[in-house]
Image (cartoon, helix red, strand yellow):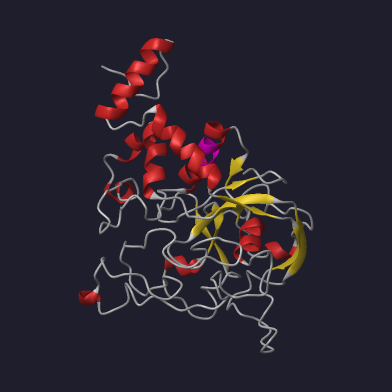
Amino acid sequence: MIPKCRDQFFVIVGVLFLSACGNHAGYPNAESLDRLASKSVANQVFVKGGTFEIGDVGQKETGTPHVTWNQYSRPAKVVKLAGYSISKYETTWGEFMLYLKETGHLDRYDDRPSQRRYAQVSDDPLSPYFRQKPARAPNFAEAEGYCDWLGKQTGLPFALPTEAQWEFAARSRGQNIPYATDTGLVEKDPYLRPPREYIDPGTPPEGNALIHSSATFERRSVGSYPPNPLGLYDMTGNVAEWTRDWFQEDYYEHIAMNNPSGPEQPVGSHTPEKTVRDWAGHGEYMAGAGTVFFRSGEPIDGGGNGFRCVVNSPEPIN
């Protein structure tokens, strides 16, 4: 049996075999991996470190004390972060599938329909799996694995963001705004909203965020809407995003002041959960659940969340 491209060979044979695999067996060649590494570095936006009040700070201009309906985002606490860089885009199907193929992980999802739906890619812009649309990882481990793998490809400290890093960037370095859009407010794209019979994947984007009330798998290509003032796209809407922190309901009561990174291990005896941010990416929610403040946990073996990576370097990398 011919081994897959991820296996190691003698130098000359390895190069020839890698090229053949990339062209005929669907496994990526060295050139495609180099392009991905270069693009991933170029797409990083530097976030200068600073101090901000993480959590539900309310709407001070209107006097509203809280925005979110549950207690998970309270009380707001002042924290300090070192500088880092974060991807301006959510990880796409095209990028994620390169990782799954090159590592051999794609084989894990061949025979399970519930998992295979998170391991596909298409060149058709009208497909929900179009290579420029945001990937939805089959579980937390693959999202984390992708960022770790990027680190090996680039030699840089890539990782999933902590939720403090995620929120600081979504709020353009901690501004008191409810949505990570160009205006800090949301203008919903009517796409994917009922009645479903009028949905057309060829309809151009409108508004500044995709927040919908439909359970359909379809999303917009990354970068379809204006970025937030920091230059980041889709941190409100499109897909919800994994962070690397273990979820703890009362985390803000115990949060560290400097570079918080969540509990060191799963909290409680229930199914281990990681914190997911941007719940507008799950659909249309009421009572503040679509805002940048809202946080909740999801089981680590659950599929359907997107993600983006950070580089934990206090200086710009590009």
Q: Which residues are magenta?
A: 145-150
In the displayed structure image, the side of residue 47 where residue 43 appears, left or right = left
Residue 56 part of the magenta-drawn span: no
Front-most of residues 81 and 251: 81
Quadrant of the image containing the N terminus: top left
In the displayed structure image, the side of residue 233 where residue 170 appears, left or right = right
x and y, in percent, of residue 74 in the image:
68, 72
x and y, in percent, of residue 33 in the image:
43, 33
Residue 149 part of the magenta-drawn span: yes
x and y, in percent, of residue 14 in the image:
38, 15
Query: What is the total number of numbered labels drawn onto the structure image?
Result: 0
Q: Is residue 142 above or below residue 48?
A: above
Q: Is residue 132 above or below residue 312?
A: below
Residue positioned 50% across, 77% down in the render: 186
Front-most of residues 29 and 81: 29
Quadrant of the image containing the C terminus: top right
Front-most of residues 276 and 196: 196
x and y, in percent, of residue 166 in the image:
61, 58
Residue positioned 28% across, 32% down in the render: 26
Q: Can you tell which quarter of the image residue 41 is in? A: top right
Residue positioned 33% across, 23% down in the render: 19
Front-most of residues 252 and 179: 179
Residue pushed farthest bottom?
Answer: 62
Q: Is residue 278 above or below residue 274?
A: below
Q: Magenta part mainly helix, strand or loop?
A: helix
Residue pushed farthest left?
Answer: 197
In the displayed structure image, the side of residue 144 where residue 313 appears, left or right = right
Q: Is residue 34 above or below residue 7?
A: below
